[in-house]
Image: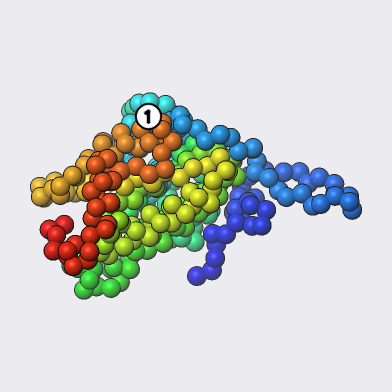
Amino acid sequence: MKDTHGIDPAGIPKFLPQFLPQPVPQPVTQSQPVPRATPRSTPRALPRSLPQSLLVLGGTSEIGLAVARRLITRRTRTVWLAGRPSPGLEAAAAHLRTLGAEVRIAEFDALDCDTHEETLGKIFAEGGIDMVLLAFGVPGDQARDEADPPAAVRVAQTNYTGAVSAGLVCAGALEHQGYGSLVVLSSVAGERARRADFIYGSSKAGLDAFAQGLGDALEGTGVRVMVVRPGSVRTAKTAGTAQAPLSTTPEQVALAVELGLRRGSETVWVPGVLRVVMSALRHLPRALFRRLPV
């Protein structure tokens, strides 16, 4: 597949010129070095306030919608829900409107990477976005996916490949406008592969590493990346099933996201004790780790 996610040598994402005004070229004399193009606005100090505008990639995600609801009750006034067209997406938008927000819907498919630049470029062209929440992903079914490699590949393409594509496009747009936050929903499952879910866990491990590196790459640009690592999340889809230890809820993740934004955090664990638990598990010998009921 051809590379459609690059950034040109001037630091401006390739897709933006067709949507956004560009700086007026300045005359260059023979004695002057050729000036580099600069972002549309000077990078600001990283904001620790909550966003006024929010783009949710994965517009039907229970966690994503919980975050949107919480931020609307605080400061957010404009919300974009990006996802595949469905009654669920329309219902989610309608509910958020009852909370007082202006809500718009954009068609977005994480697996269709060739459309990401155009789709997301049009959203940013409508006005500045203070925060992008990368909330899409699929858990897969470990037993089924082991027996069906194409199904396993779909999990990896959704959780990792699609996220890399959308993450780079949004990061470039945020950098071009000179401010904003990219919040990435990772998982503690990515901290160490387990027999029970190593296909899903490996996709989240890749996403987590990508998001950390992207945050380092954006240092000093006015854009920050915050990685959120929740434990098992109790949702409508998991109702009636046995819950894992230290599980959490979409609302608790939303609270942690808000606190992380206010504190300027780079990594957020939900619940917070998982930071210590996973640090210990990460260093257990493999022979011992295999015997744990996790």
Q: Amino acid at mark 1?
A: Ile
Tell me which residue sits at (46%, 60%) in the image. 113
Q: Residues within 10 Å of mark 1 (few under 14, many from 20)?
A: many
Figure check: 158 above or below 32: below
Horizontal and vertical percent for residue 212? 44, 52
As drawn, 204 above or below 264: below
The quadrant of the rendering that contains the C terminus is bottom left
Q: Establish if 152 lies above or below 165.
A: below
Residue 95, image x, y percentages: 31, 33
Q: Is residue 67 left or right of residue 132?
A: left
Q: Residue at x 18, y 67 (%)?
A: 287
Say which of 206 and 18 sits in front.
206
Viewer can see residue 242:
yes
Q: Position of residue 211 (x, y in %)?
A: 43, 52
Residue 194's image quarter?
bottom left
Q: In the picture provided, is 243 more to the left or to the right than 83?
A: left
> What percent of the width, then of the height, locates residue 126?
55, 39
Q: Please tell me how many numbered marks the rendered image carries.
A: 1
- What residue lies at 49% left-to-right and 42% top-to-bottom? 224
Colour mapping used in the image: rainbow
The residue that disc 1 covers is: 72
Residue 104 in sight in this render: no
Residue at horizontal 10 percent and vertical 50 percent from the top: 242
Name the side, left or right, on which 243 lies relative to 74. Answer: left
Residue 190 location, quadrant: bottom left
SS class, disc 1: helix
Between 210 and 278, the one nearer to me in the picture: 278
Q: Residue furthest right?
A: 30
